[in-house]
Image (tube, rainbow, N blue to C red):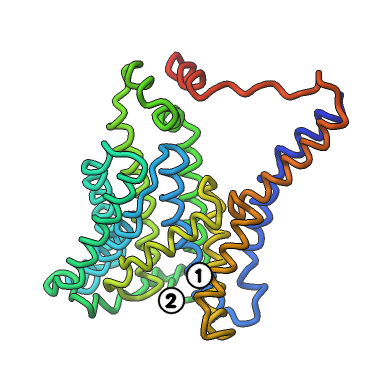
Amino acid sequence: MAGAVRTRRWTRRIPLVIGLVALGVAIAFPYLVDRPRFWLPNIGVRSIWLGIIAMSLVFLNRYVGLLSLAQVTVAGISAYGVGYVMVTLEQDFLLGALVGILAGTVAAFLIALIAARTRAIYFLMITLAIGQVFYSWASQAIEVTNARRGLAPVLKPDWGVVNLNDITTFYYFALAVGVLCYLLCRYVGASTFGLTLQGVRDSPDRMKALGYNVNAYRIAATTFAGFIASVGGVLLVLDRAQVDPDVVSLGSTLDVLVVAVVGGIGSLGGVFAGAVVLTLLSNFAQNLTDRYMTLTGLVFILILLFAPSGLAGIGRQVKRFVDRRRAAGAGPSEEPPTAPSTEHAITEGKQR
């Protein structure tokens, strides 16, 4: 019995161990590559801001059951906010970042007001349509977005000790922002608010009967996810040093969706693994073959065939395999207790 308990505790730590190893590799990454000036911006930093934007999509899907294709649009609005303040108004980065994040978060709130009453494919299509409307506007609004030419240059700030023009410093800055966004999403998801969102996801009618304003919670969750996407938009415009309509194009939207699915549509941390796969393929597949899009598609299909839950699901698959082996050699009395339901957890949180 004691051995079974120790095994169960060990298997529960598998995802945590994988996450800590991944974080360790990310911290050591600048010292593991032979060409930092190529690897850090093209793979490292790009994977981080792609992962943050995809994380906002995963948060909505995981805790509310909504799949939004407007997260790239929100990130793009944030990037345009930074670009407009720094290029057009010639102000500093901190003001630009504040305006950009505020603009993206407000945009997410307005999108939520329009789409929050719908679910499933209807929510997805409304958010996709909103994104395409913004793309069309950004391509023509010369006075605000400079149309197809975009806003440039968006210069990285130099704060003396912290100079983001140094690629290694900028990489660690982006990594710190990515970790903070992940921890914030985990904290919100584990809070009473997060438990309520899961109740809204699983049983919206029952939550209404209990007195919860379901639409208000969906709007709040979409707004929070927009805040996360807006932070990713700030890193995006710093990395690219410009912002143009390609940032909010349909191709960019599909990139983020692919990152979320390959990393694990239910995993907040898995999005970074998905982003690394996408950036590696986009940088190297073109050198291998003229049909690099076909090669990229085949790689994604293979990942989803052998890891239906995405790359993050591999750790859970290992955990389930170990649990099954343990259960096969243990008696029926050693089965783990049933976890309390989401509704029970919400009720307890409300009573507290």
Label 2 sits on residue: 165
Tell me the amino acid under the disc marked 2.
Asn
Q: Is residue 207 above or below residue 115?
A: above
On the image, the x and y values in percent for residue 4 come to 84, 29
On the image, the x and y values in percent for residue 24 come to 66, 59
* Left or right of residue 52: residue 334: right
Q: Residue at x 27, y 58 (%)?
A: 131
Mark 2: secondary structure: loop
Q: Which residue is drawn at 24% across and 51% down?
A: 107
Label 1 sits on residue: 169
Q: Is residue 284 above or below residue 221?
A: below
- Quarter of the image where one finds residue 1: top right
The foreground one among 80 and 293 is 293
Q: Residue at x 58, y 21 (%)?
A: 340
On the image, the x and y values in percent for residue 74 come to 30, 56
The foreground one among 291 and 314 is 291
Alpha-carbon span between mark 1 and mark 2: 8 Å
Mark 2 crowdedness (10 Å alpha carbons): few <14, some 14-19, many ≥20: few
